[in-house]
Image: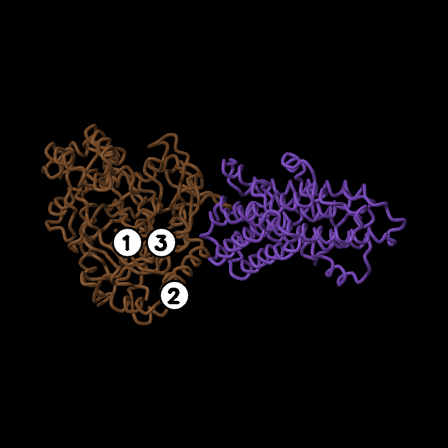
Amino acid sequence: MLSRVAETLYWFGRYIERAENTARLVSVNTNLMLDLPGSMAPGWGPLITLLGADAEYAERHPEVTELRVVNFLLSDAEHPSSIISTLEAARENLRTVREVLPREAWELINDLHHRALEVLRPNIARHDRHAALTTVILGTQALTGLLAGTMNHDIGYQFLNIGRKIERADMTTRIVDMRWENPLPEAASESDLSPFDNVLWMTILKSLSAYQMYRQSRQVRINRPDILAFLFQSMHFPRALAYCVEAIIVDLNEFPNNVLPLEAARALRHHLLSSKVAKMPDKTLHGFIDGLQLEIAKLHTLIAETYFLAPPEMIQSQTQTA
Amino acid sequence: MAINWDAYDNHPFHDELVSEHGNARTHARKLINYLENMSPEDLQERQDAADLAIKQMGITFRVYTQEEGAIDRAWPFDIVPRVIRKKEWNETEAGLKQRVQALNLFIDDLYHDQKCIKDGVFPKHVLAESVNFRKQCIGVNPPLGVWAHICGSDLVRDSDGTMYVLEDNLRVPSGVSYMLENRAVTKRVFPELFETYQPEPVASYPSDLFDTLAALSPRPGDTPEIVVMTPGIYNSAYFEHAYLAQQMGCELVEGRDLVVGDDDCVYMRNVEGLSRVDVIYRRIDDLFLDPEAFDPTSMLGVPGLLRAWKAGNVALANAPGAGVADDKVVYSYVPDLIKYYLDQDAIVSNVPTWRCMDKDSLKHVLANLKDLVVKPANESGGYGMLVGPASTKAEREEFAKLVAANPRNYIAQPTLGISTVPTVVRGGLLEPRHVDLRPFILSGKKMNVTTGGLTRVALRKGSLVVNSSQGGGSKDTWIVDA
């Protein structure tokens, strides 16, 4: 497999995952705003922080309002991480490697991009938002399913998957960290969550489509330690960190010249599984998450240095933002 | 009824489907009957369905505008096929093979003994001023002695019904992917037509191309590693590069994916490390191929590529320098070249051509600009030409200066009344629009011509410009036994 193609597939995986995650986040935050009383509601600012786009947002918008944030995250073609921009980037990436993917995959992403342009209009009405976001989420899921079912599960597919898993692992840490950005008074005891804190933790689970799976797997009511253990250490839930890292290790295992990236992925897995994440107080948790994010970034760098084309080309650096 | 024969006015041009008397031509009768039984609404609906299919399939081309830069546009397609009788096509096909065979002998001769010059068939000064002659290629022996493995020749039919070759594209001709996609779209839109008609299939082109390329491999016996080399996603034909790579199951590479080793072999950069490349179907112009040999500022090429090619370690298709025959002045000599190399008369005619470098011709051309089409020798895409009857006095005066300043660079031809085909216009009605035809000719161990080719159509009423970058579209082309 050409290094350039591997890189493109990797980024394609990341962009698709990013579009889906952003759609989930906006959808869940919309619901959260309806559940919390005004004084408790975190508003829309934390979403921008969570996605690491504070500076860019501030440059373009004088204030944080629902309308502005939703436009920024959904339909703003100038913002490189908006859903429209990431789908556009995914489509452009796929175009450059369309000869290695099944033709239906190209038609699907092409169609998804066209449909997203139609439904993710600027200033979209709140009652249309859910349907529009569902279009994006189902579209990206259809693409995942199509590729899983029709593409050779060779090294190209593995790069695409690693891209998805790295993006997803990173996003999961960010979403849990949102808890830190929205401090509510710490609950007196860990099992005794205040009703609003309860709502917040449920929101986090739902952002990751994890609520139902959590209930099924843990069979306990909402409580902080179990949620943290589930989201960080589950080997069965596909959006849990440990699951993502394990999947990356399985793929990397088959790669040539894999010593350095594999080492980094294994270290990450070790840190995850050996940690006492369930018991960490908020401040420790925040530091722990920072550490994980650095490790994920390092894993990305090692994969890029080992497998992708060496010199950062003009086009790459302009269009592909981590 | 979608066709109002009283209003269908192709006069004075030859229509491919309709005779002078407003009747369907024999080979198009079933198609015309079928269209006659459709209402304009039905026909428009099918056209809309085709447009949607093209959007869904992502069949696009890139155009450049000053205002918007590069934009990706849906491929403009008209659903009414252009139909050609098989008997006529067989003869055209033989003529094309003959022509390309002579051209390849000519190119090989130019880079070796230049017998055609010594024998007085081709003037030395024309070669001396050719911008596509590459002195770096002198003495090179490409595999099988073939230089132009893929040729796209443009054909037009004049009002008297004669088919002419208008030009030969021997550098990096494009359009074949659209020929293949047009058929795929037509099958989606008119499935029932295929029950009564059996147009000859076009789908074998990618495997024919693969076989042609594989035969060039410097490592016979092995499964050759063939790649398609593209300038990248911003090239107007990128869609086609990706399409052909996909259809042939080859890697699509950019210059930065390749490297020439100390052993003068070409390698591509893989996740696993380097691996050898045997044949490069390059869709990038000579001058950008290799910054060591040609344009040193090229970012698209591979340093040392020409060295590897000369050493016989990699095959390039088309060979560098093949474009020397892709010159409208050279074009005017093709009938002589066919006679000289093959001792045959040309089967398909050239359009009568005045070479402005000849004093008498220049005089004639300057005096008759209003009736002629004047073309620069080395432009493609329909740029830089003057269409006399459609020009203003000021344009002609301006152009006369250009021609007088550099006569070698211009040729002139009579304005042909190129043929028409019924084409869907707004509201599902049919009107005549002008078409040309670009078949693709493959040369290797054997020769292959596409079944028909890409029919391009000028969608604007009265327009003769069929280039997609300038308002042209395309049609499916059917070769039928009737």
| For residue A110, above or below residue B378 | below
Can residue B441 be seen in the rendering of this structure? no
**Could you give the CA–CA distance between mark 2 and mark 1, rounded to whole angstroms?**
20 Å
The residue furthest right is: A188
Quarter of the image for residue B81 reads bottom left
Tell me whether the residue at label 3 lies in contact with that at label 1, contact meaning CB atoms closer than 8 angstroms: no
Q: Chain of mark 2?
A: B
Q: Is residue A1 left or right of residue A263?
A: left
Along the polypeptide, which appears first: circle 3 or circle 2? 2
Query: Are the residues under marks 3 and 2 on the same chain?
Result: yes
Query: Are the residues under marks 2 and 1 on the same chain?
Result: yes
Tell me whether the residue at label 3 lies in contact with that at label 2, contact meaning CB atoms closer than 8 angstroms: no
Q: Chain of mark 1?
A: B
The residue furthest top is: B405
Q: Which chain is purple?
A: A
Residue A275 position, x and y percent, is 78, 47
Along the polypeptide, which appears first: circle 3 or circle 1? 3
| Mark 2 surroundings within 10 Å by alpha-carbon count, few (fewer than 14), some (14 through 19), many (20 or more) | some
Q: Which residue is mark 1?
A: B433
Q: Which residue is mark 3?
A: B178
Query: Are the residues under marks 3 and 1 on the same chain?
Result: yes
**Could you give the CA–CA distance between mark 3 and mark 1, rounded to whole angstroms?**
19 Å
| For residue B313, above or below residue B36 | above
Between B100 and A301, the one nearer to me in the picture: B100
Considering the numbered disc 1 on the image, is that residue within a helix, a strand or a loop?
strand
Q: Which residue is mark 2?
A: B42
